[in-house]
Amino acid sequence: MVKRRTVMLGLLGLGTAVASCRSSASASLKVKVLARSVPAQVLKAFSRDTLTHFESELNLIDIYQQLQWWQARSPMTPPLWRRLIPIGHSSSQDATKPPPVGAHLVTLSDPWLEHAIRQDLIQPLPDFPLAYALPEPWQKLLRRDREGYSSERGKLWAVPYRTQGLMIAYQKPIFQTNTNNKPITKWADLWRPELAGRIAMPNQPRLAIAIVLKALRYSVNDEAALLRDDVQEQLLALYRQVKVFDSQAYLKALVNEDVWLAVGWSGDILATLVRYRRLGAVHPQEGTVLTSDLWVAPTNAKLTEEAQAWMEFCWQMPIATEISVSSYGVSPSFFLPDVKVPEQLSQQTLLVPGHGEVLLPLSKRGQTNIETLLSVEAEG
């Protein structure tokens, strides 16, 4: 069994330089990383041999907006983060001029990948042999054409470093055995009458649709099922059950006891459980939905050897183990054929593909079907 102390000692042996103290101007590699998705000790370990500036962002929305800002082809109003935090002493004429690309690599999540490709915000990556060795669903996720659709001949647009799954978190006192509320065990429980107006979840329509498909025992990637009457009916019913749709504050609603349940990503939920013992969580019986945090390269960023080295570093077994343990997800490197998974990764955090489905990009037909489904929901 791999002990946490063993992993930590291995990391310390790789180096202890503090990445956040590096000068941004002198760094040979600049990485913008989603906060808490990579532990600080991993960032420090890599910085020993490579002068690297790591900058964290609290959410993916901010990262995506910065990608858009970097690639703006004409003057535009600066995003809020840029207006509130002036950098330098630019003239008024330059105030709306897009700045140079600010990173070699940034974190993005796979639901954002299609839009980033289509808007020309990111560029294809050099070959990454380990990513090509991942099971079939990952090839459809990572290899795409210039419009963002899956393609067997498509280029590699991203390298994953952390995978999470959808879970249900709940107020334990409300669902204890001595109450009238039955335990939460499956997605279908979200439709129970007593839970109406007591649920919070991210404001992402495709995730809501994926939950409906799982509850009805369809694949989350079954595009034909999107036009079935039972899917349309259950989606409308689910929206009536939910009190809070907010991608940033869905767990805050649970912690503040505004709701009884929250649907969200395992990394967020399991980290919250550590701080709030009155909360519990479950991977629903029907299986989970998998999503991944990815390294992508902004358009016009230089694809350096250091950037390649950082992506490979995240896949080294001790590093992948530490990322998995500390961020409450699992490194996709453990999905490679014949790779032995450390016992340290408990069944609660280990989301192997057999226990969940990778949410794949929609085809053109699938996009039409989902637009039809959502238009019916809007009318309802």
Image (tube, helix red, strand yellow):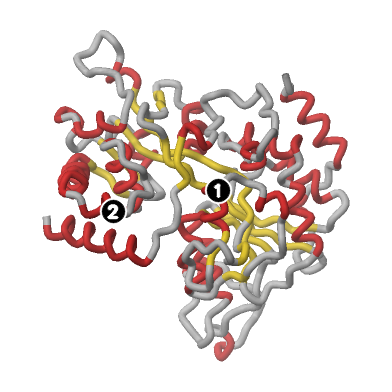
- What residue is at 20 percent from the left and 50 percent from the top? 228
Q: Which residue is mark 2?
A: 224
Q: Earlier in the sequence, mark 2 or mark 1?
A: 1
* Within-10-Å neighbours for mark 1: few <14, some 14–19, many 20+: few
Quarter of the image that includes the C terminus: bottom left
Quarter of the image that includes the N terminus: top right
* Within-10-Å neighbours for mark 2: few <14, some 14–19, many 20+: few
Q: Which residue is mark 1?
A: 136
For the residue pair 26 and 120, the one nearer the viewer reads as 120
- What residue is at 26 percent from the left and 53 percent from the top? 226
Label 1 near label 2: C-beta < 8 Å? no
Work out which residue is located at the far front of the displayed protein and give it.
152
Work out which residue is located at the far top of the displayed protein and give it.
178
Question: Disc 2 on helix, strand or loop?
Answer: helix
Q: Quadrant of residue 356?
A: top left
Rendered position, 188 above or below 231: above
Q: Quadrant of residue 227?
A: bottom left
Rendered position, 31 above or below 2: below
* 112 relative position to 215: left or right: right
Q: Position of residue 256 (x, y in %)?
A: 34, 34
Separation of marks 2 and 1 at Cα, in angstroms: 21 Å
- What residue is at 28 percent from the left and 10 percent from the top? 177
Amino acid type, label 2: Ala
Q: Position of residue 190 (x, y in %)?
A: 25, 33
Q: Which mark is residue 280?
A: none
Q: Position of residue 140 (x, y in %)?
A: 52, 55
- What residue is at 42 percent from the left and 36 percent from the top? 288
Question: Disc 1 on helix, strand or loop?
Answer: helix
Amino acid type, label 1: Glu
* 207 relative position to 127: left or right: left
